[in-house]
Image (cartoon, rainbow, N blue to C red):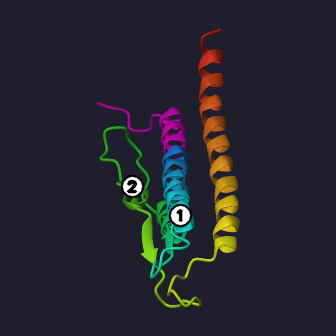
Amino acid sequence: MEDYNIDYEGDNMWIEWSNKINILNKALDGYWLRNKTINQNISNANTPNYKRLTVKFEDELRDAMAIRKHRLSRTHRKHIPVSGAIDKVQPRVEEKKHYSYRFDRNNVNIDTESADLAKNTIMYNALVNQTIGEFEKIKNVINEVNK
């Protein structure tokens, strides 16, 4: 007879680390797409009738993380894992058609785009550093076990 009261703390730690990396990956995907979109806006700043594009993903990612906090937990390694809502998060590109303050009907403001690009770059680099830190933790654990 199997003992179902086995401590799976190691498995849970691995699952939590994997979830963290998955969240960071989704955020990096969103910020990368936003970077490409902002650069496209800047490239088309003088194109008549061009409409500014934006990327939305933070609210959806935040909601998926909230769902993850309230989901069931896996108590045995042979149980079916609960599928995460985080895997379903996809950044959305939206066209801003509502306004145009220029005569050529282009609604790109180069100053706004430049500021958004700087902010986005800072956020992306911070997430890259955080991801590197997570992998460094695992590397340190592996090195300690091998001593």
The residue sitting at 46% across, 86% down in the picture is 97
Q: Mark number for residue 43?
A: 1
Give the spatial CA distance, label 2 vs label 1: 32 Å
Give the vertical position of 41 relative to 97 (above or below): above
Residue 11 percent across, percent down from the top left: 47, 35
Q: Which residue is mark 2?
A: 87
Give the vertical position of 33 relative to 79 (above or below): below
How crowded pointer 2 is (Cα within 10 Å; few <14, some 14-19, many 20+) is rated as few
Residue type at mark 1?
Answer: Ser
Does residue 11 belong to the magenta stretch? yes
Q: Which residues are magenta?
A: 1-18
The quarter in which the C terminus is drawn is top right
Taking depth in this image into account, of 36 and 86 the one nearest to the observer is 36
Left or right side of 7 for 132: right
Closest to the camera, between mark 2 and mark 1, is: 1
Taking depth in this image into account, of 36 and 4 the one nearest to the observer is 36
Residue at far top of view: 147
The residue sitting at 68% across, 49% down in the picture is 126
Taking depth in this image into account, of 90 and 121 the one nearest to the observer is 121
